[in-house]
Amino acid sequence: MKQHLALSLLGLALATQTAAAQVQEPISPIPLEVAVDPSKADLGQRLFEDVRLSARSDRSCASCHPLNANGMDGLPRARSYDGKLLRNTPTVFNVGLDLFLNWDGAFESVGDLTDRAITKASLMANTWPQVLAALKADPDYVARFSRIYPTRRITKATVLDALETFQRSLITPNSRFDKFLRGDRDALSADERRGYQLFKSYGCASCHQGVNVGGNLLQVFGVFPEAARRELSTIAPDPGRYGITGDELDRNVFRVPSLRNVAVTAPYFHFGWAPTLEDAVRTMARVQLGRSLSPEEVRLIVQFLGTLTGEFRGRPLEPLKPRVK
Amino acid sequence: MRTELGQPLAVVAALLALLIVLLVQSRSADLPLGEEMQRALLGYELYDAELTRDVLTARAGLQANYESLATDRRNLARALEDLVSRSAAGSLEWRAALQRPLADLKKAHDEKRLSVEYFKARNALLRNSLMYLAFAGPLLHIPDEQKPFAADLGRLSYALLRFTQSPDPEAAGQMQHVLDRLSAAPGFRSEIATLVAHGRLIVTLVPEADRLLQQVVDAPTGSRAEDVLAALSQHTRTAERRAQTFRLLLFAVAVLLLGYVVYQFARLRAGAVSLRRVNAKLQREMDERSRATEALRSKELQLIQADRMKIVGQQVSSIVHEIGNPLQSLLMNSSRVAASCDDMLALLQWPDRAADDATIGGLPYRTARTELPQQTREIQEAAARIAQFVVDLKQFYGSTPKSAPGAFSLNEAVRRAERLLRHQINQSTSNWRMNLEGDLPAAHGDARRFEQVVVNLITNALEALPDRSRAVSVSTAWDATDRRQILQVEDEGVGIPEEDLAHICDPFFTTKQGSGGTGLGLAITTTLLNDMGGRLKIESQPGRGTRATVEIASAGESVAAQAQ
């Protein structure tokens, strides 16, 4: 009893600091709609799926972010335009709700990221004059740009605006968890609710929080270094954000990824080495929280994570079928 | 012409261009921009304050998640971008004035953003570890055989409470000590190990998070924003002063332009005046020239006329010669016949009876006795008139030899003419006046010819009188200015009609055809005077009278004039 009393006291002490966090859930629901100009979004979708954006006219944005495949390629690592392996492709869904984009958080604006994707040698390797010339040669584009934009012209700015508007429109609202947050207590099963409680109490929600359950925070991968070394012994090293800032403080720092639709966007981590969500949860618990979860705890948390899968254009997202080689 | 017009136009255009430049400069586009910039800066400071507030509440555990911090970050980035784009929109000076403080603000902004992100990461871990100790700790199942740990766990809770309240080195040391004891204990369990690991994390994370929090709070973004504001107001003041200067210059140039236009206007007017003057002069010259041409032509006409006259004169002298001899015989014989007639009639003292029947030359005697002498006298007079006309003709057409010019007394010539015409004067007027200048020098010319001039003029004057009561006056004078002697013959006669005045000196022009005028009198007079270097001027008012003025040089003057 004594020790229980002592720890209760400890809990009391800490409760003063955590009380407020209990008032409000760390996760907020995705808005049901985003205010975008539908004609711009339509135009953006056409561009998004247009292979002429790439240097050899053989790859579009949708090649790696197919909308009918949960907005990503499902590969552990993306294949670059020049045939090398890149990091894992994150889904394009809910990209407009992220504060930081890419695994290393190099971008904060969808437009900047898109600009880079079109011109980067490893992605689409194109140049703007070539992109604009190709688009201007298409009467349908000329007519639509001139109808939609006050400048009436196809420019880098209007092309990026249409693409960004489209990507911002790609939200997956109405997940069962969002329904739960909106007051539908029955939207989650008892196990899922227990999983959510574990998610919060084990500290996952310290980083995976906000509307996108992540995406707004940079965090070191490997809070518990020994555990991380064990976990990543077979994985190629990646200095993370250090690669772009060169700051020692950023070594092994990555963007905390969004857990929205996490159950349908396997594989996991920046090099996609975790094929299942269970693997990913176990790894995270060891590397970031310094604890080993019981299979039951993992099951509960995975149950909860499954409730974060939303609807795209009114239809619930589903797990991808295994890719045929 | 083009340069005369072009230069003022160029000056006016240049002044207008200057006016426009000054107008643009005096408007100072930076001023409205400054107000917008000020608002944008206030917006930035507001977002900055929100960020600091949200970081503090996050540290206090009062934020459920980092969404508000994400929003703050986006808002601040937009606000800064807005500031930078506004700063690039103004004038060169504006950009120069804002560049440095904005760069400083951006630096502080970036540093603060960085601190915030590191803080977020540390804070997330800290909350995680605290959460573990708060929620997982109490769930630990501590078996009885590990009771000693229970006391250490109790110590740990107190140490943690103290450390979180006041994370000073002493409290950290105490935490460390308790954690060391826990980890060094035998039979160490993995759950205890996790507890220890999180405890150790807390020991390092709390100071780190607080240090980052302090960095966020101390970030000089607020004072940098104030610096931008200060630079802005400094620039605004400078721009306002500059605009004021340009407004003054604008006014000055406007006055200059006005002055220049007025000056050009005055010049134009002066030019117009002088143009009119030149024009008038030109007109006068043209008139003069046409008069000269006219004179030349009349001179030519006169020469032609003179030539004709010469030919006529030659013919006249032959005619005169032809007439002269018969006339001499006529004159001589007629006077002889007249004398013979008287004598013969005296001899023919026929008895009255006989006389009644007798005829002479077909005429009854009585008639012939009275009419014959009369008829012979008429023959004599007619011959005499022919003789006079022939003399006049000879004189006019120069058949009279030119006498050598000498000196004569004007007054004497006048007095001789008066004596010559005494009879005629008495018959024509009862009002004859003569007023001769007492002391005249000798005139240049021929006395006898001049005498004829005077006779002609006086005769004309007398013949113009309608009755005897009208006056004729003759005067001589000395014109000291022109050094000439003047003779004037004035009458109160019928005058000369204006249309005749120009012709009265022409030969054969006469208004006295009926009374036997030959039309040669004034022509001869003019010719005579011209020969002597004199001049005749005739003025007349019809009904009032006529004045003939003769100017003639003094003898010495003429010589002197010729010598010149």
Image (cartoon, coloured by chain):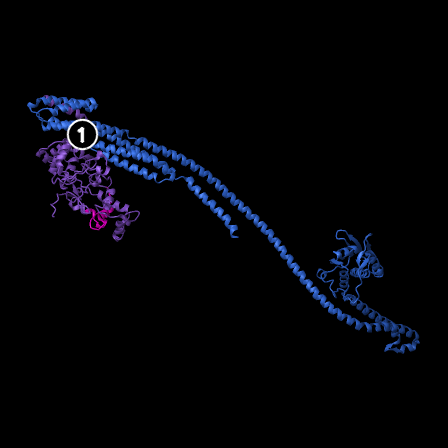
Chain colours: A purple, B blue
Q: Is residue B458 above or below residue A162?
A: below
Q: Nearer the viewer, residue B539 or B221?
A: B221
Q: Is residue A142 left or right of residue B286?
A: left
Q: Secondary structure at mark 1?
A: helix
* Image: magenta residue range: A35-62
Residue shown at the point (11%, 40%) measured from the top left: A276
Q: Nearer the viewer, residue B312 or B121?
A: B121
Which image quadrant is residue B522 in? Answer: bottom right
Residue type at mark 1 is Arg
Quarter of the image containing the C terminus of chain B? bottom right
Q: Is residue B494 left or right of residue A24?
A: right
Q: Is residue B442 above or below residue A162?
A: below
- Total labels drawn: 1
Asked if the stretch drawn in magenta spans residue A41, the answer is: yes
Residue shown at the point (41%, 36%) measured from the top left: B240
Mark 1 — on which chain does it sit? B
Q: Is residue B361 above or below residue B59?
A: below
Which image quadrant is residue B117 in? Answer: top left
Which image quadrant is residue B263 in? Answer: top right
Residue A144, image x and y in percent? 26, 50
Q: Nearer the viewer, residue B230 or A162?
A: B230
Few, some or many residues within 10 Å of mark 1 (<14, 14–19, 20+): many
Q: Nearer the viewer, residue B44 or B191?
A: B191
Asked if the stretch drawn in magenta spans residue A57, the answer is: yes
Answer whether residue A238 is visible to the viewer in this image: yes
Answer whether residue B544 is visible to the viewer in this image: no
Residue A111, image x and y in percent? 25, 43
Residue B140, image x and y in percent? 10, 27
Q: Is residue B56 left or right of residue A275?
A: right
Q: Is residue B137 above or below residue A58?
A: above
Q: Which residue is mark 1?
A: B127
Residue A108, image x and y in percent? 24, 39
